[in-house]
Image (spheres, rainbow, N blue to C red):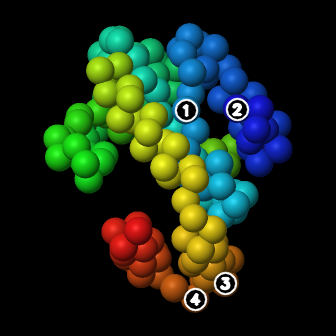
């Protein structure tokens, strides 16, 4: 987390440090927060927790964030084109407007550790041309408001699908 401390700012850094300490497990940050296309106070923050006891971890996260189970969604993902299998996990969306903190936290079982960590590495190390295009899209959407959220999401998904 030290490598993104400046991007997070003091409040968010302390928030995530306290969360990580409470959960007693590493928070794996991925996506734009780890790349050059992160836009402060606009881009969301993506985090993954890998655990050997998913249900217990979900309960701890929900208690810490003071959110209901309704904010937790079971997800199914194909992480690799080489491995045609689907892995399951849980997604928690958290948003605190007052403190300007928003993030998606994904929880996976330890049996998927290798696949998940490889995916994090791949997402965090996209080619420069992809990062540049993503940054331009974010400027058009977040800063200039020249494209809608729907168009932004569609273009972003298409870019990742092409890659």
Label 2 packing within 10 angstroms: few (<14), some (14-19), many (20+)? some
23, 49: nearer the viewer: 49
Q: Which disc is residue 146 wearing?
A: 4
Judged from the image, the secondary structure of the residue bearing numbered disc 3 is loop
Which mark, residue 28? 1
Q: Nearer the viewer, residue 22 or 29?
A: 29
How far is the residue under mark 1 from the one under mark 4?
A: 32 Å
What residue did someone put label 2 on? 1
Q: Is residue 19 above or below residue 84?
A: above
Query: Where is residue 95 shown, x and y percent of the image?
Result: 53, 45
Q: In the figure, residue 62 lies in which quadrant? A: top left
Whether residue 116 appears in this view of the structure is yes
Element on which disc 2 rests: loop
Sequence-wise, the earlier of marks 1 and 4 is 1
Is 14 left, or right, of 67 in this rendering?
right
Q: Earlier in the sequence, mark 1 or mark 3?
A: 1
Residue at 35%, 35% (x, y): give it. Answer: 115
Mark 4 closeness class: few <14, some 14–19, many ≥20 residues within 10 Å: few
Q: Distance from label 3 to label 4 (Cα)?
A: 5 Å
Q: Secondary structure at mark 4?
A: loop
Cβ atoms under marks 3 and 4 closer than 8 Å: yes
Q: Earlier in the sequence, mark 2 or mark 1?
A: 2
Please name the residue shown 55% across and 32% down the image. 28
Quadrant position of the N terminus in the picture: top right
């Amino acid at each position: 987390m030290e490598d993104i401390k400046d991007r997070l700012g003091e409040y968010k850094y302390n928030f995530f440090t306290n969360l990580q300490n409470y959960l007693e497990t590493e928070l794996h940050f991925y996506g734009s927060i780890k790349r050059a296309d992160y836009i402060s106070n606009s881009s969301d923050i993506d985090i993954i927790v890998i655990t050997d006891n998913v249900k217990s971890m979900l309960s701890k996260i929900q208690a810490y964030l003071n959110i209901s189970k309704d904010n937790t969604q079971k997800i199914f993902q194909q992480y690799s084109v080489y491995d045609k299998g689907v892995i399951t996990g849980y997604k928690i969306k958290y948003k605190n407007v007052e403190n300007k903190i928003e993030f998606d936290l994904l929880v996976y079982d330890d049996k998927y550790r290798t696949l998940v960590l490889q995916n994090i590495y791949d997402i965090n190390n996209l080619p420069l041309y992809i990062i540049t295009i993503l940054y331009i899209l974010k400027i058009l959407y977040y800063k200039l408001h020249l494209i809608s959220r729907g168009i932004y999401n569609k273009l972003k998904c298409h870019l990742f699908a092409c890659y």
